[in-house]
Image: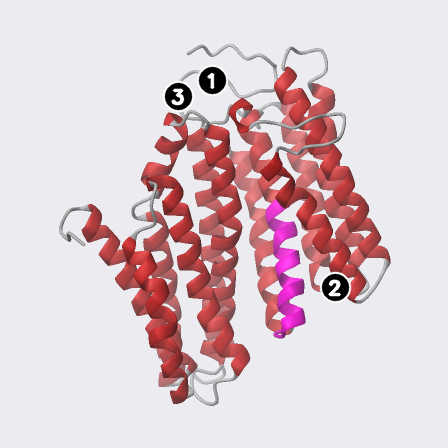
């Protein structure tokens, strides 16, 4: 391979794995705050409507990060123009995150405007920078990305101008524009569609970026766990035990995510005949995995605050949905990596409701979260032993 770049802003492809730059790490710090804002929003709106709203807000946070991640996979973040794009994006993302708690209130238009400016502005800059260079496939791809960003922006801004259920519907359409459109190649009338085989991505960089976002999400669970314990008036035995269980669940999620598949995922992309398609799969599934970690963080705060007592339907739903969504997302992730979902994950998904739902009669949030943490550790241990050959199941 050669280190010659077809475009002065593109990453050199010299056969070495592209490293994550310091400016990308700075960029990720914005999303520490954004994730905290999403989890706090859900905590304050624990209802079906609140869950739907939080889900849309999480999609907006993820899509803003995801499209920036693809940009820095193609284009070198250590070049001054790309750094400036990242800095502007960071400022918009920070303002968007600050407006997030009132996104369905008085700051809806600010939230929507920041997101739309981020998505449209990034794509427009890249498209303009590609003019005059013989990169027909990438240029056409960004024309289509810009087209869908503009369509999505119309829905985002229109939603910001209205209130109530109409805002929710319009923003759901906006999310669909940018999450679903890659599934059919950003197809647009007159522009055709893109093909993933033309997406010459760096697999190792993409996997590392997703893994770093996972660290951010797990870090948020640790922040919530520590902050909730610090704010507890009396450190009773139940409170301290709940703290330990919450930490154990975080470790279990780290174990399931990082211990095995993360080492093979970049190799799978690199060796694939269609690395862009595999990379897209990883991004589709990470919205589930990372969202489930946020849900588990919310569950941890609820348990530490009230480890014993009446277990409401809402709290039960949060404590069950988080770990189950995480295992489902990881089963899909490892299906992409290995060609089949691990038996440990499938069994874990079956055992979660079968074993945990009967425990709800004890009306103990602590017991429910503790059981789910032990199950997640069991899944991780089973997979480790299985792949090491110690288990032949």
Q: Residue 154: which quarter of the image?
A: top right
Q: Residue 254: which quarter of the image?
A: bottom left
Residue found at x 34% / y 60%: 251
Dot label at residue 102: 2
Residue found at x 40% / y 88%: 361
Residue found at x 36% / y 69%: 352
Q: Residues within 10 Å of mark 3 (few under 14, many from 20)?
A: few
Residue ranking furthest to the right: 161
Q: Is residue 359 visible?
A: yes
Q: Name the spot of residue 37 as percent of width and height, x first.
A: 62, 61
The answer to which of 251 and 372 lies nearer the viewer is 372
- Quote the CA–CA distance across marks 1 and 2: 43 Å
Q: Name the spot of residue 160 as percent of width and height, x first.
A: 81, 56
Please give the residue where the numbered disc 1 appears in the rendered image: 13
Marks 1 and 2, the one that precedes in the sequence: 1
Q: Is residue 42 above or below residue 344?
A: below
- Which span of residues is magenta-colored? 46-64
Q: Is the C-beta separation of discs 2 and 3 under 8 Å?
A: no
Dot label at residue 16: 3
Label 3: element kind = loop
Label 2: element kind = helix
Residue found at x 72% / y 51%: 173
- Quote the CA–CA distance across marks 2 and 3: 45 Å
């Amino acid at each position: 391979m050669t280190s010659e770049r077809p475009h002065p802003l593109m990453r050199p492809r010299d056969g070495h794995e592209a490293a994550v730059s310091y400016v990308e790490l700075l960029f990720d710090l914005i999303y520490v705050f954004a994730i905290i804002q999403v989890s706090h929003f859900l905590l304050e709106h624990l209802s079906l409507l609140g869950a739907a709203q939080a889900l849309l807000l999480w999609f907006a946070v993820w899509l803003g990060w995801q499209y920036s991640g693809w940009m820095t996979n193609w284009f070198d973040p250590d070049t001054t123009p790309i750094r400036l794009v990242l800095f502007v994006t960071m400022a918009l993302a920070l303002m968007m995150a600050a407006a997030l708690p009132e996104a369905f209130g008085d700051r809806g238009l600010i939230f929507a405007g920041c997101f739309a400016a981020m998505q449209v502005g990034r794509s427009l800059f890249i498209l303009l920078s590609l003019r005059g260079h013989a990169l027909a496939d990438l240029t056409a791809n960004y024309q289509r990305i810009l087209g869908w960003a503009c369509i999505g922006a119309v829905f985002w801004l229109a939603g910001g101008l209205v209130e109530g259920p109409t805002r929710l519907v319009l923003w759901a359409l906006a999310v669909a524009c940018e999450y679903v459109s890659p599934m059919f190649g950003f197809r647009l009338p007159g522009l055709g569609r893109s093909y993933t085989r033309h997406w010459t991505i760096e697999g190792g960089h993409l996997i590392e970026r997703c893994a770093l976002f996972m660290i951010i999400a797990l870090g948020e669970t640790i922040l919530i766990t520590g902050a909730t314990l610090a704010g507890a008036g009396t450190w009773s035995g139940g409170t301290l035990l709940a703290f330990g269980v919450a930490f154990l669940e975080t470790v279990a999620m780290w174990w399931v995510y990082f211990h095995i598949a993360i080492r093979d995922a970049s190799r799978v992309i690199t060796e694939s005949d269609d690395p862009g398609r595999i990379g897209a799969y990883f991004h589709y599934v990470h919205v589930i995995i990372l969202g489930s970690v946020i849900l588990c963080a919310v569950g941890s705060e609820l348990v530490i605050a009230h480890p014993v007592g009446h277990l409401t339907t809402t709290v039960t739903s949060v404590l069950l949905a988080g770990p189950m969504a995480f295992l489902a997302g990881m089963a899909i992730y490892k299906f992409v990596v290995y060609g089949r979902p691990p038996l440990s994950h499938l069994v874990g998904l079956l055992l979660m409701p079968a074993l945990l739902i009967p425990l709800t009669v004890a009306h103990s949030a602590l017991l429910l979260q503790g059981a789910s943490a032990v199950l997640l550790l069991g899944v991780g241990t089973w997979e480790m032993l299985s792949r090491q050959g110690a288990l032949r199941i």
